[in-house]
Image (cartoon, coloured by chain):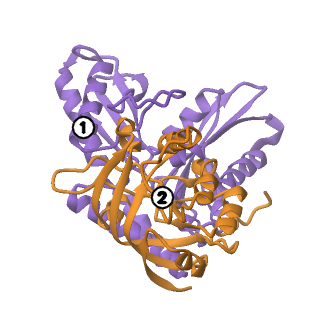
Chain colours: A purple, B orange
Amino acid sequence: MRMLKAEDVSAAVRDMIIEACRVLPEPVYKAFVEARDSETTDSAREVLDQLIKNADLAKATNMPLCQDTGSAVLFVEMGEDVRVEGGLKQALTAGMVEGYDKGYLRKSMCHPLLRKNTGDNTPAIIHLELVPGDKLKIQFMAKGGGSENMSRCTMLTPAQGWEGIKDFVVRRMAEAGPNPCPPTIVGVGIGGSFDLAPTLAKKALFRPLDVPNPDPEIAAMEKELLEAINNLGIGPMGLGGKTTSLAVKIEMHPCHIASLPLAVNVQCHSARTKEVVL
Amino acid sequence: MATYHLNAPMTDADVAMLKAGDVVYLSGIIYTARDAAHKKLMAALDAGEQLPFDLKGSVIYYVGPTPAPPGKPIGSAGPTTSGRMDTYAPRLHSLGSKASIGKGKRNQAVRDALKEHNGVYFGATGGAGALLAECITASEVIAYEDLGPEAIRKLTVKDFPLLVINDAHGGELYAKPNYPL
């Protein structure tokens, strides 16, 4: 059994969080530049110019890209032959708390009804999967509330099929309009169960922006949905234009013969994800 | 579409001339408030208490900034989604507030209030918090410190870049999505 020190896990989580909130993944930055060059109206180009400047400035000055530094979402793949001294969850939480403190990041978690801030961004939202091997892979997402609020889950009937899925996703993005900070990235979870579909949708958002689903049929569905969403004309920050979304990411899973669970998890353009393997 | 350099607090004349699509560079004093602060403001009004700032001509910025790093007046400070403040905005406009700054759609009640009380809704670029913070030269918590990022702050801004989304004459800038809703 391989043993990892809690402090090493915490330090890796801390550093990953601070970096993720300041430096956009390269494919997202590249997509801003490509979108700006393809837009034809002044307002759309101006928004994308500001996003590019913002990304440059955040990187150069260590200022967070966005004031909403999010819920700390962690997807963890833990090898069955590795353990963390003192416990995995404690190590992840300690690293998260330190990252949000030392990185001057906003603490955005509160009691759902009393609305009292927990003060240190706890608890992190942790998804754990056990996998073969002795490695520990930790993926972090700073998930903003504005785009999360525009996300939806539904249970379609099997008869509704692909057409029903398409209508639900495109309608959702049309209704969301300017609210989730377009150009967005749309995570779609198809299948599984009532609880699994949104997790699939969130997991889909961790896939690098420029990587389609490895299944060519699903990749074609992603492309079809993206075209339909971009035909809405909502554009950057809702001011009109060709770029309403930068990508659609689908994850699919078998489901019950009676059901067709579907979830849409909306990600704003400040798509801050990062991963570390220990 | 015109470009203006205006001061906050705002005058009725400045608000009245603005049209959806105009670009405004705002300088002066604005106040931050988001969900929890608005709730407290409403409770203070219900109790007949004095508010922590003068509503007359006020510009309210829907923002919860990140903590100020050493040497900076404020952290990252872009707009949050305005729709959550739709419940509160008409009452604040009726009491003299002139403008709000946020991102995303406003409901009919807010659009009506802008017309009735000569108000304006500005959009700032969501997710450009580092860039927008460059236009904030001073920040001071003036109320509800216990709310942390949601406390009310008095901000001094210089040429803060805004777009008129909803004007006082019923004009709206956002693109209508090309889909039957």
Quadrant containing the N terminus of chain B is: bottom right
Residue A62 location, x and y as percent? 22, 55
Left or right: residue B117 compared with residue A89: right
Q: Is residue A79 visible?
A: yes
Instruction: Count residues near mark 1 (Cα–Cα under 10 Å), then give few for <14, some for 14-19, many for 20+.
Output: some
Residue B9 location, x and y as percent? 44, 68
Camera-near label (1 vs 2) is: 2
**Chain containing the residue with disc 1:** A
Q: Residue at x 44, y 29 (%)?
A: A116
Query: Label 1: which residue?
Result: A101
Q: Quadrant of residue B139?
A: bottom left
Measure the alpha-carbon separation of dots 1 and 2: 28 Å
Q: Along the line of sight, which residue is nearer the eye, A6 or B172?
A: B172
Query: Label 2: which residue?
Result: B60
Q: Is residue A213 visible?
A: no
Residue sitting at the far bottom: B2
Residue A27 location, x and y as percent? 39, 59
- Element at label 2: strand
